[in-house]
Image (tube, helix red, strand yellow):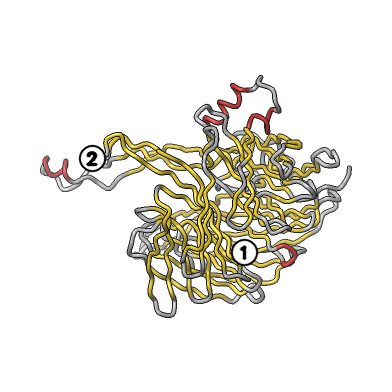
Amino acid sequence: MRVFFLFFLFSTSLSAQIIQNVEIEVVGRPSWQTIIPFGKDGMLLLTKTDQTKAKVVMFDADLNKKWETDIFLDVERSPTSYSFDKEQITFLFRETRGMYYQVYIFDLATGKYQNKGFEVREFFDDQNYIFLKNKILMAGATTKGAGFYSFDFESEEGKVIEIDIRGKVVLQDLKFVEKSNLIKTIWSVKELAYSNPKRKKGEYVKDAYLAIADFDTSGKVLNISKITQKSGNFPMTAKSLTMLDGRELISGTYQNKTGDNGLFIAFRNQSEISTPSFISYARFLYGNTDSNRDELKKLLKDYRFLMHFPVENDGFFSVGGVFFKPEFQSRQVSDAYSSSSAATRGISFGRPSSRTQTLLAGYTYLTGFVANIKPNGELLNTNKIDIKQSSTQLRQTLSFNSAGAVAYCIKGDLAARNFNIGTKPILYKLSDEDKSVSNQSYLPAYQEVRFWYDNYFVANGAKNKIEVLKLEKKGPFKKKKKNQNSTFTQVRKTIYLTKIASGISD
């Protein structure tokens, strides 16, 4: 299978807000794509181009291509995670089955790369990692709770490092402070118990909290703090932001058995953590009215919340995100021929059988919000945003910056506005054709938008076209043997990268 990768770079005058567009065409069997902004240093695109191939492309801040590199990548899924500094970026890939890992290390200036592999023979659920010269340190879960897996590429030795955070854990945040060689983490912890401890039946959650822990680069614990429940509000997820004054803002979601779920805000000064403030989703979406309680209850029943990283502004903080739900579809899958039933009848062939398989089809995004909060936890204002977007991957469909600018994907289009100066949303379309159920699968659509630098955002979209091609095969006999034709399919995928400026007055 040959893979073609073409670039089309052009500026547009359709709107003063659009700065640059890039179209990239991939022909083969492409699947996922990922964009990673580096601020004024540029942006990187990683895309799977075929079953065993991928391409990495580095752009400058004006979306001019700096370099591109092809790699052999025989894995189905997008990278488990990535890590970068000013000089290099690394991607960690894991096989769908088995515990073999591949690490690709790219020089950001030239695109030259190294590929290193290792195998984990113990149980370890990796959730994120940091790369330290010739060593990788993966953070995740062991059979007992939180832990690290350290692998040294020089000695080719790996080991599990258990952490004194016990229970069912999910890593929420991982940051490496290079100046102090400090690893900062946040873990959500569920302590489990059983109504029948002897038989380990009747499992339930005894307690839920967040553990904030710092480590050195060997995985040694330096300190551990907790954010625990208050008035029945249990913190579940969290992200952190290092502020200009050196403190850390910790913000995330909480759950209450009454259904009064929402976001919390807390501050960390060294190892001391302030009492968190809790704000319900009802206030973010509907203000202080109770008229939309039923609508909120239905929303929280079917949808989850994907939180944006908090942003520090002048005298306040911005938080937000989108509500999404996974969509599944069922299909009939043919199993291998069954020989058992055929053997009982004394025949040499089996009969075809099938089963129903449920697969993840993608994600639906319904609505989102952006809110400004004072350092004391007081809600200044909030803006609800209707998304109504779908995507095959879990993506960031809403983004905002410290200047009040907001960009988001809506029904496959890209919208930008600034709530601080009251502008109406400006809409950018990849197609003027009206979307419907019958044509939305092949029309180009934006799927993701990320804050880039200053007042600029970058959006990521795609369009797939399936082509059926005929391959002629000549028979082995020359006399009166007709040519035998077979067909195969390939995907012609166009990737769209769009740089926009948001927040300019109408």
Q: Which residue is mark 2?
A: 198
Front-lying residue, 28 or 194: 194
**Does the rendering let one see residue 271?**
yes
Q: Position of residue 204 (x, y in %)?
A: 37, 36
Front-lying residue, 385 or 401: 401
Q: Which mark is residue 290?
A: none
Q: Which residue is outermost to the front? A: 272
CA gap, disc 1 and disc 2: 60 Å
Q: Which residue is outermost to the bottom? A: 154
**Does the rendering let one see residue 1?**
no
Relative to 87, say whether 366 is above or below.
above
Q: Residues within 10 Å of mark 1 (few under 14, many from 20)?
A: some
Please give the name of the residue rendered at 70% of the width and 71% of the height, measured from the top-left corner.
66
User: Is residue 415 found left or right of 185 in the rendered image?
Assistant: right
User: Is residue 12 found left or right of 306 in the rendered image?
Assistant: right
User: Is residue 300 found left or right of 124 in the rendered image?
Assistant: right
Q: Position of residue 427 (x, y in %)?
A: 77, 42
Q: Which mark is residue 5?
A: 1
Q: Amino acid at mark 2?
A: Lys
Q: Which residue is outermost to the right? A: 506
Please give the name of the residue rendered at 59% of the width and 77% of the height, measured from the top-left corner.
112
Relative to 149, say whether 328 is above or below.
above
Element type where label 1 sits in the image:
strand
User: Is residue 482 found left or right of 214 in the rendered image?
Assistant: left
Quarter that holds the C terminus: top right
Q: Residues within 10 Å of mark 2 (few under 14, many from 20)?
A: few
Q: Nearer the viewer, mark 1 or mark 2?
A: 2
Relative to 356, say whether 72 is above or below.
below
Q: Amino acid at mark 1?
A: Phe
Q: Position of residue 79 (x, y in %)?
A: 51, 59
